[in-house]
C-alpha cells in the first residue's frame, strides 16, 4: 500500500513520473498492457490515459477494464485531451 501512495503523489506532479514508478516498482504495467509498445506509446502521447488504464485494469481472470473502470479511463482521456488542447491554445496566445 505504501507504493500506491507514492505513485499517487508522483502522479499528481506528473503522470509520466507515476507511470515510471509503476514500471520500476510493480508489475502492474506488464499486467495491464499486452505489449510493451502500447505502454511506451501511452507514456509518450497519452500518459493520463495510460495511468488510468493501469489503475482500472483487473488482471484476475483476464477481465480487463469493466464498469466504473471505463469511467476512470475516460477521465484520463479527457485530462490528456485538455492538456494537449491547453498547450496549443497557449502556443497560439504566445505567437500573437
Image (spheres, rainbow, N blue to C red):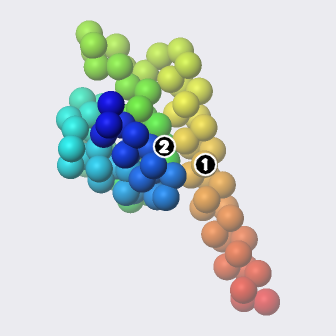
* Res 78 → quadrant: top right
Looking at the image, residue 84 sits to the left or right of residue 8; the answer is right
Looking at the image, residue 11 sits to the left or right of residue 68; the answer is left
> What residue would you read off at disc 2?
49
Residue 35 sits above or below residue 11 on the image: above
Looking at the image, residue 45 sits to the left or right of residue 30; the answer is right
Residue 60 in picture, x, y percent from top left: 27, 13
Lower position in the chain sequence, tag 1 or tag 2:
2
What residue is at 67 percent from the left and 79 percent from the top? 91
Residue 70 in picture, x, y percent from top left: 53, 25
Q: Secondary structure at mark 2?
A: helix
Q: Is residue 69 visible?
A: yes
Residue furthest to the bottom: 96
Q: Is residue 46 visible?
A: no
What residue is at 72 percent from the left and 88 percent from the top? 95
> Residue 79 got which mark?
1
Residue 50 in picture, x, y percent from top left: 42, 43
Which quadrant is home to the C terminus? bottom right
Q: Residues within 10 Å of mark 2 (few under 14, many from 20)?
A: many
Looking at the image, residue 66 sits to the left or right of residue 17; the answer is right
What residue is at 43 percent from the left and 27 percent from the top? 56
Q: What whole-number distance in Å separates the C-alpha atoms at marks 1 and 2?
A: 8 Å
Which quadrant is home to the N terminus? top left
Q: Secondary structure at mark 1?
A: helix
Residue 63 sits above or below residue 24 on the image: above
Residue 33 in picture, x, y percent from top left: 28, 35
**Proximity of marks 1 and 2: CB atoms separated by less than 8 Å:** yes
Amino acid at each position: 500500500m505504501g507504493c500506491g501512495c507514492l505513485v499517487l503523489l508522483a502522479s499528481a506532479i506528473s503522470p509520466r513520473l507515476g507511470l515510471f514508478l509503476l514500471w520500476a516498482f510493480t508489475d502492474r504495467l506488464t499486467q495491464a498492457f499486452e505489449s510493451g509498445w502500447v505502454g511506451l506509446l501511452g507514456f509518450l502521447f497519452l500518459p493520463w490515459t495510460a495511468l488510468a488504464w493501469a489503475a482500472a485494469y483487473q488482471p484476475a481472470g483476464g477481465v480487463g477494464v469493466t464498469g466504473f473502470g471505463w469511467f476512470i479511463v475516460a477521465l484520463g482521456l479527457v485530462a490528456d485531451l485538455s492538456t494537449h488542447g491547453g498547450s496549443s491554445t497557449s502556443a497560439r496566445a504566445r505567437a500573437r
